């Protein structure tokens, strides 16, 4: 690493500025693309983990209070693939 890069990295660390990108560096951790990161955050139902009422039943009350509820399938209407086939095309089950 050159002296200039070391100085820049030290200044960035002291000032709270973002670190210098290490892309291409042999020891740099690979960056996960946003699309893949979003996919990793989904549960087995194809919904964002933190928003899935089947994984987190306590969330049901929130969706019901907002009027976003499919009583027939016991899940939010916005996550109901049986009622909205276009959601199934996006991976929602």
Image (tube, grey):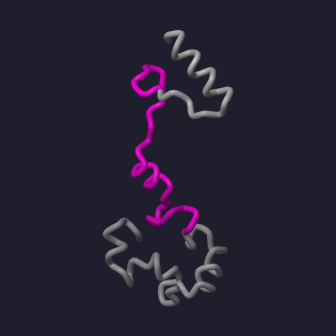
Q: Residue 7's quadrant in the figure?
A: top right
Judge whether residue 77 is colored magenta: no
Q: Residue 55's quadrant in the figure?
A: bottom right
- The relative height of residue 5 versus residue 41 in the rendered view (above or below) is above
- The relative height of residue 27 versus residue 41 in the rendered view (above or below) is above
* Image position, residue 85 (x, y; %): 33, 78
* Image position, residue 62 (x, y; %): 63, 79
Counting every numbered tag in the picture gives 0
Residue plotted at (66% across, 74% down): 58
* Image position, residue 59 (x, y; %): 63, 74
Quarter containing the C terminus: bottom left
Residue plotted at (59% across, 80% down): 63
Judge whether residue 37 is colored magenta: yes
Is 26 placed left or right of 4 in the picture?
left
Residue plotted at (59% across, 84% down): 66
- The relative height of residue 51 versus residue 38 in the rendered view (above or below) is below
Is 64 placed left or right of 73 in the picture?
right
Tell me the chief SS of the magenta region.
loop
Tell me where the magenta segment starts and ends, as one range. Answer: 22-51
* Image position, residue 6 (x, y; %): 56, 15
**Nearer to me, 2 or 88:** 2
- The relative height of residue 93 versus residue 10 in the rendered view (above or below) is below
């Amino acid at each position: 690493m050159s002296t200039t890069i070391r100085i820049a990295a030290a200044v960035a660390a002291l000032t709270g500025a973002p670190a210098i990108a290490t892309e291409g560096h042999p020891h740099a951790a690979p960056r996960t693309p946003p699309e893949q990161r979003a996919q990793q955050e989904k549960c087995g139902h194809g919904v964002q983990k933190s928003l899935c009422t089947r994984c987190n039943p306590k969330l049901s009350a929130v969706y019901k209070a907002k009027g976003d509820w499919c009583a027939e399938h016991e899940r939010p209407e916005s996550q109901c693939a049986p009622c909205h086939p276009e959601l199934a095309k996006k991976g929602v089950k």
